[in-house]
């Protein structure tokens, strides 16, 4: 089974599902103003924590959510205004994701936290889809085999501030966005020694990047890649490739790069179409 929260609950303990069922260890539905602090939420066979179905104002503080079996450490779905602060979201099973935010989730904040996907499959640490106006602040994201972060269709008006997205694997991205528009990145760091730091793909329009660093080291992958996505702006940033192209703009009109430093072993800025 799973532990469920009612309105106004405050918990400082452990929520664990050690059975072979797929129920979440912590399941919050249609409830408001709960706090889970200084604890462990663990499920080796399914999702660790799920906040869903209109739940609001849940706080996860100084806690660890851990999952195996290709599941989610924390799933925020169709709910709003939750805060994850000073916490560790860890997926160690193949195909698992540290944090998924989707199905209309809005107004949620991830701050001062670490999110990790450590499994053997190419899964992201954080995955957004149809999730808008959420905030990531002063947090760290990494995936052993996949992208550190992904924003998919309907993930608009989200903000990333003072955060790090780092990957060790070749052919992956620090962040990959598709059909994700009007998002902002401020004072953040993206590292991909063997891949692309930030990939804005088809239909990712009107995103604003300010005061950030993009560091890549692959001859096969540009540091910053913008493809079939118009009206994106990069200001006051540092874009470096120690082995290949720094910036590749492919069929992406009205792009603006200003007051920025671009350094490359290969082509600094490659504009195609």
Image: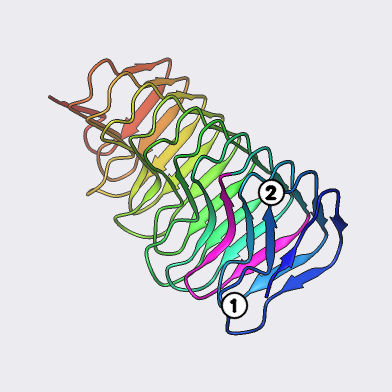
Q: Is residue 182 above or below residue 128?
A: above
Q: Is residue 216 above or below residue 9?
A: above
Is 8 one of the magenta-colored residues? Answer: no
Image x and y of residue 19, in percent: 64, 84
Q: Is residue 60 left or right of residue 216?
A: right
Numbered disc in front, either 2 or 1: 2
In which quadrant of the rendered view does residue 272 lie? top left
Q: Is residue 206 above or below residue 31?
A: above
213 and 35: which one is in front? 35
In which quadrant of the rendered view does residue 238 lie? top left
Circle 1: element type? loop
Q: Is residue 167 left or right of residue 58?
A: left
Is 70 one of the magenta-colored residues? Answer: yes
Q: Residue at x 38, y 52 (%)?
A: 193
Q: What residue did someone put label 1 on?
A: 44
Residue stretch rendered in magenta on the structure: 62-78
Q: Is residue 10 left or right of residue 222?
A: right
Q: Neighbour class for label 1 at 10 Å: few (<14), some, many (≥20)?
A: many
Q: What residue did someone put label 2 on?
A: 30
Residue reaching furthest left? 273
- State which tag comes first along the sequence, 2 or 1: 2
Image x and y of residue 146, in percent: 39, 59
């Amino acid at each position: 089974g799973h532990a469920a929260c009612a309105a106004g609950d405050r918990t400082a303990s452990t929520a664990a599902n050690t059975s072979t069922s797929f129920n979440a260890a912590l399941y919050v539905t249609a409830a408001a103003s709960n706090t889970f602090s200084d604890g462990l939420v663990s499920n080796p066979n399914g999702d660790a924590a799920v906040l869903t179905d209109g739940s609001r104002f849940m706080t996860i503080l100084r806690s660890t959510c851990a999952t195996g079996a290709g599941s989610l450490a924390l799933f925020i779905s169709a709910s709003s205004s939750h805060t994850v602060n000073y916490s560790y979201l860890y997926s160690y099973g193949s195909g698992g994701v540290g944090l998924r935010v989707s199905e209309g989730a809005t107004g949620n904040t991830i701050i001062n936290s670490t999110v990790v996907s450590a499994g053997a499959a190419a899964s992201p640490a954080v995955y957004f889809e149809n999730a808008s106006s959420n905030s990531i602040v002063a947090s760290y994201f990494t995936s052993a085999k996949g992208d550190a972060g992904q924003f998919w269709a309907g993930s608009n008006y989200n903000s990333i501030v003072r955060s790090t997205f780092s990957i060790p694997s070749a052919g992956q991205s620090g962040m990959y966005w598709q059909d994700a528009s009007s998002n902002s990145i401020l004072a953040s760091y993206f590292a991909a020694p063997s891949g692309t730091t930030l990939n804005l793909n088809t239909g990712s329009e009107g995103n604003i990047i300010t005061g950030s660093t993009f560091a890549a080291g692959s001859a096969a992958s540009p540091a910053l890649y913008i493809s079939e996505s118009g009206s994106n702006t990069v200001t006051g940033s540092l874009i470096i490739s120690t082995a290949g192209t720094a910036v590749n703009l492919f069929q992406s009109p009205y792009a603006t790069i200003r007051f920025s430093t671009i350094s490359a072993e290969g082509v600094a800025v490659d504009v195609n179409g």
